[in-house]
Amino acid sequence: MANGSRQAVWEFFGAELKRRREEARLTQVELGARVFVSGGYIGQFEQAIRKPQLDVAQRIDEVLQTDGIFERLCRKLIDDPRYADYFAHVVELERLATKICEFAPTVVPGLLQTKEYARAVTVAANPFKTDAYVDEIVAARLERSLILDDAARPEYWVILHENVLRIPVGGPAVMADQLEHIAALARNRTVPVMVLPYAEGAHAYMTGTLKLMNFEDAPPTAYTETEFSGTLMDDPAVVKHTQRAYDLLRAAALSPRASLPLIESAAEDFRRCASTT
């Protein structure tokens, strides 16, 4: 489904939600209390500013007795074959975020990946898929990264474990291009990039990737991901806990200024290796 079509359906979702809510004589605050979100969230759903998670859509159907219409719409909109089921909502939230903080323990985050790096990662995870499938996944990943080119782009902070600089994804030439791309973003002050060096040993978050997202008119959200699953969380206590973990990672990492030479040095090493093969 094209982006314009998807947005049109989300707008229909919001308009229908408002109509059904008003028919039930409930305010946004009253409906929000019954489905365990704020009244402000309900307002954002109705304006198609923010998209509800599937479990919230299901609870709305129960409260408004709408025979599953909001669940069906939600499933249709998050059913994007280019993304894992657990990641589709994260893509929507990235577009709305005013600030994103990310920690990557082994692989360059999707928002920073070059085309060839994204291809190498996708092929490694899907060795028996067709080229057409791989092309679609790579295109979707590059499409996500366009938010960093937008004048209204979110403030984006990234912590890379030193693993990310050393694992030769796609071979030396691909890695050289990828690290040079990251270095250019750092030099241009598009993205503050910090490296967590091997010398730090154990660190505050050892179980996978971590992403924190802040919004203009909504509470912050945290997302964690391991190899085959991801969890999106907006419970304030849990988000506070993940924010503390990210703060500890940032305290242990090199500063952006100290990290840049390390990234450039790793890129040079891969470039030299590529030139001799």
Image (cartoon, rainbow, N blue to C red):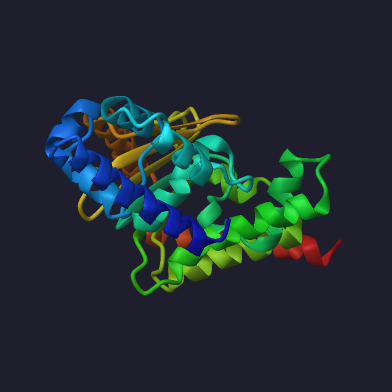
Q: Is residue 256 above or below residue 66?
A: below
Depth check: give the residue in front, 198 or 69.
69
Indicate the position of residue 234 as horizontal and vertical percent values.
30, 34
Residue at x 28% of width, y 37% of height: 243
Depth check: give the residue in front, 176 or 266.
176
Instruction: Classify residue 60 by image quadrant.
Output: top left
Residue at x 20% of width, y 39% of height: 23
Indicate the position of residue 142 as horizontal and vertical percent values.
59, 61
Horizontally, residue 232 falls left or right of residue 243, namely: right
Query: If the image is split into quadrants, where does the C terminus sit?
Result: bottom right
Instruction: Classify residue 180 by image quadrant.
Output: bottom right
Indicate the position of residue 131 as horizontal and vertical percent values.
82, 53
Depth check: give the residue in front, 250 or 118.
118
Q: Is residue 15 above or below residue 227?
A: below
Indicate the position of residue 244 as horizontal and vertical percent values.
27, 34
Horizontally, residue 219 falls left or right of residue 125, namely: left
Residue at x 72% of width, y 39% of height: 125
Picture mark count = 0
Q: Is residue 259 above or below residue 200?
A: below
Q: Residue furthest right?
A: 277
Residue at x 44% of width, y 64% of height: 147
Q: Do we see residue 8 in this rendering?
A: yes
Query: If the image is split into quadrants, where does the N terminus sit?
Result: bottom right
Horizontally, residue 6 falls left or right of residue 228, namely: left
Q: Residue furthest front?
A: 23
Q: Do we see residue 255 in this rendering?
A: no
Horizontally, residue 182 falls left or right of residue 242, namely: right
Depth check: give the residue in front, 136 or 109.
136
